[in-house]
């Protein structure tokens, strides 16, 4: 099986997606960049660190709880859920939903 240049580019972009977006969403949702005054390189490094921690935790939970072999798609599904659930708009929606008085 030959791996084309397009496949390599897609893999590298997906890898960067996994390693940057969850941390960037968490920084944006919590407002740490504005509160603590991080500049762009600091924010990138912190987002990378948060994302790596999330990826390690997710992969350990998947591997230990289900005793399955981890593959790229399993991690992509779990990481996508983390990304979706940590965006500012989703968090704000659930906060408004919880604060609404019961009718």
Image: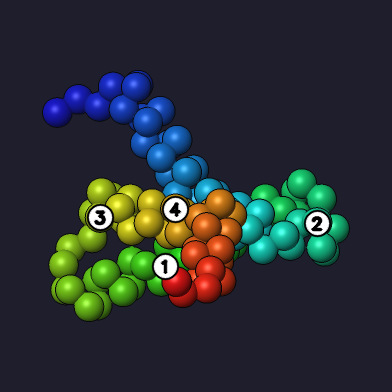
Check whether the beta carbons of the residues at disc 3 and disc 1 lie within 8 A of each other.
no
- Which badge, 1 or 4, is on the more N-terminal residue? 1
**Crowdedness near tag 1: few (<14), some (14–19) or many (≥20) residues, C-alpha within 10 Å:** few
Distance of label 4 from label 3 (alpha carbons):
16 Å
Mark in the foreground, 3 or 1? 3
**Label 3: which residue?**
74
The answer to the question of whether label 1 and label 2 lie on touching residues, with beta carbons closer than 8 A, is no
**What element does badge 1 sit on?**
helix
Measured Cα–Cα span from mark 1 to mark 4: 18 Å
Gap in angstroms between the C-alphas marked 3 and 2: 34 Å
Helix or strand or loop: what does disc 4 sit on?
helix
- Closer to the chain start, of discs 3 and 2, is 2
Which residue, given by chain and number where applicable, does mark 4 sit on? 84
How is the model colour-coded?
A: rainbow
To which residue does mark 1 refer? 56
Q: Quadrant of the C terminus?
A: bottom left
Q: How many marks?
A: 4
């Amino acid at each position: 099986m030959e791996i084309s240049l397009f496949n390599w580019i897609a893999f590298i972009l997906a890898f960067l997606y996994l390693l940057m977006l969850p941390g960037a969403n968490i920084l944006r949702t919590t407002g740490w960049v504005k509160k603590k005054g991080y500049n762009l390189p600091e924010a990138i490094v912190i987002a990378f660190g948060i994302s790596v921690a999330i990826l390690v935790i997710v992969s350990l939970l998947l591997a230990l709880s289900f005793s399955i072999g981890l593959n790229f798609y399993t991690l992509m599904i779990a990481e996508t859920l983390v990304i979706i659930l940590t965006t500012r708009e989703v968090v704000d929606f659930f906060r408004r939903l919880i604060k609404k008085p019961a009718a």
